Amino acid sequence: MKLLFIIALILFQVLCSGQSVEDYFNNAFAKSAIGDFYGVIQEYNKILELYPEYPLAYMNRGNAKTALKDFRGAIKDYDKAIQIDKSYKDAYYNRGTAKSHLKDYTGAIKDFNTVIKFDSKNAEAYFNRGTSKLFSGDIEGACLDWSMAGELGLSDAYDLIKEYCQ
C-alpha cells in the first residue's frame, strides 16, 4: 500500500511539473555545456526531489560541484551515490579525485583501490592512485602505479615516471 502511494505521488509530481526526468537531464546537460554549473545543480535537485534514490543524479550533481571546486559537497553526493549502489565505480573514482583535491590522499587511495578492484584495466585509476601515493610519500608505489597506467595505454604516465622514478 505504501509503495502504491509513493508511486502515485511521484506520478502526480511528474504530471504537475510538466517535465520528465529526461527533460531535467537534458537541461542539466545543456547548462553544463555552457558552464552554468549552479544551474546544473538545480536540475539535479529537481530530479532528486522526484527520485531521491537515483545514484546517477547524485553523481552528476557531485560532478557539477567538483567543477565549482566544492569538493566537500561533491564528496557528500558521491557518498550518497555509493550508499545507494555499492558497485558504482565511477562514483568511487570521482570521490577519490575530490579527496585528492582536499589532500586526503589516504582516502583517495582507498577509493582508487576500489575502482581497480572493480576494473583492473582502469588506467586513470592507476594514474591517480600513483599521484596520491606520490603526495603521501610513497614514491615507489607511485612509480609502480604509473607504470601500470602506461602499460594500459595512458602515455602521460611515462612523463611522471621520467620525472620521479629514475
Image (tube, helix red, strand yellow):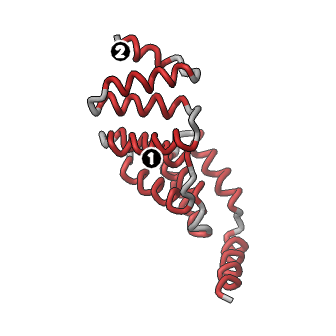
Residue 139, located in which quarter of the rendered image? top left
| Residue 116 on image: x %, y % | 52, 39
Q: Disc 1 marks which amino acid?
A: Arg
Instruction: Name the residue located 57 percent from the left edge and 44 percent from the top edge.
Output: 118
Specify the quadrant of the image occupied by residue 50: bottom right
Q: Residues within 10 Å of mark 1 (few under 14, many from 20)?
A: many
Query: Which one is closest to the eye, mark 1 or mark 2?
Result: 2
Q: Quadrant of the C terminus?
A: top left
Q: In the image, is 44 to the left or to the right of 22?
A: left
Q: Position of residue 90 (x, y in %)?
A: 55, 45
Q: Residue beneath label 2, please? A: 165
Instruction: Please name whichever residue, 124 or 55, is drawn nearer the observer in this view of the structure.
Output: 124
In the rendered view, tell whether residue 107 sits above or below residue 160. Answer: below
For the question of whether residue 136 can be seen, the reply is: yes
Q: Residues within 10 Å of mark 2 (few under 14, many from 20)?
A: some
Q: Secondary structure at mark 1?
A: helix
165 to 49, vertically: above or below: above
Which percent across, then down, holds residue 40? 54, 51
Please tell me whether residue 10 is drawn above or below residue 99 in the rendered image. Answer: below
Please report the residue visible at 52 percent of the width from the left and 57 percent of the height from the top.
Answer: 81
Which residue position holds label 1?
95
Up-down relation of residue 6 to residue 49 (above or below): below
Three-letter code, disc 2:
Cys
Residue depicted at 40% across the width and 44% down the height = 110
Residue farthest to the bottom, as pictured: 1
Mark pair 1, 2: CA separation: 27 Å
Q: Earlier in the sequence, mark 1 or mark 2?
A: 1
Q: Nearer the viewer, residue 138 or 163?
A: 138
Q: Is residue 43 visible?
A: no
Q: Is residue 107 left or right of residue 21?
A: left
